Image (cartoon, rainbow, N blue to C red):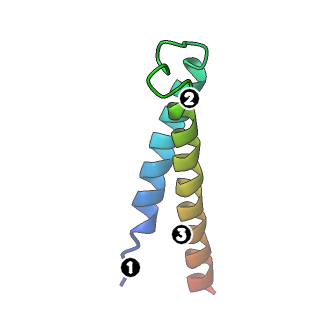
Amino acid sequence: MGIDIRLPIGLMFSIFGIILTLYGLITRNDISVYSRSFGINVNLWSGMTMLIFGGIMLVFVFRARKVKSK
């Protein structure tokens, strides 16, 4: 079976992670945006978490392809 779900999941989480991280960095000095979350930059932290998770999924995909090709 050539279907590996890790690739689209990794790409999706990486793209959304980049978008959220950039938005969090752009709006980090805007206190009104983060007043409901007690001043925590939720966009930045969730974006970085999604980016790390997406990166891990992509590493697993490329490791599996490397092992399969040997």
- Give the vertical position of 34 relative to 5 (above or below): above
Residue 61: give its label.
3
Query: How much space separates mark 1 and mark 2, taking CA atoms?
Result: 40 Å
CA gap between label 3 and label 1 equals 12 Å
Q: Which disc is residue 41 wearing?
A: 2
Which residue is identified by label 1?
A: 2
Query: Secondary structure under badge 3?
Result: helix
Which is more N-terminal, label 1 or label 3? Answer: 1
Q: Quadrant of residue 65?
A: bottom right
* Circle 3 crowding by C-alpha within 10 Å: few under 14, some 14–19, many from 20: some
Front position among marks 2 and 3: 2
8 left or right, relative to 20? left
Dot 2 falls on a residue whose secondary structure is loop
Q: Name the residue located 52 percent from the left edge and 26 percent from the top edge.
A: 38
At label 1, the amino acid type is Gly
**Residue 53 higher or lower than 2, as above or below:** above
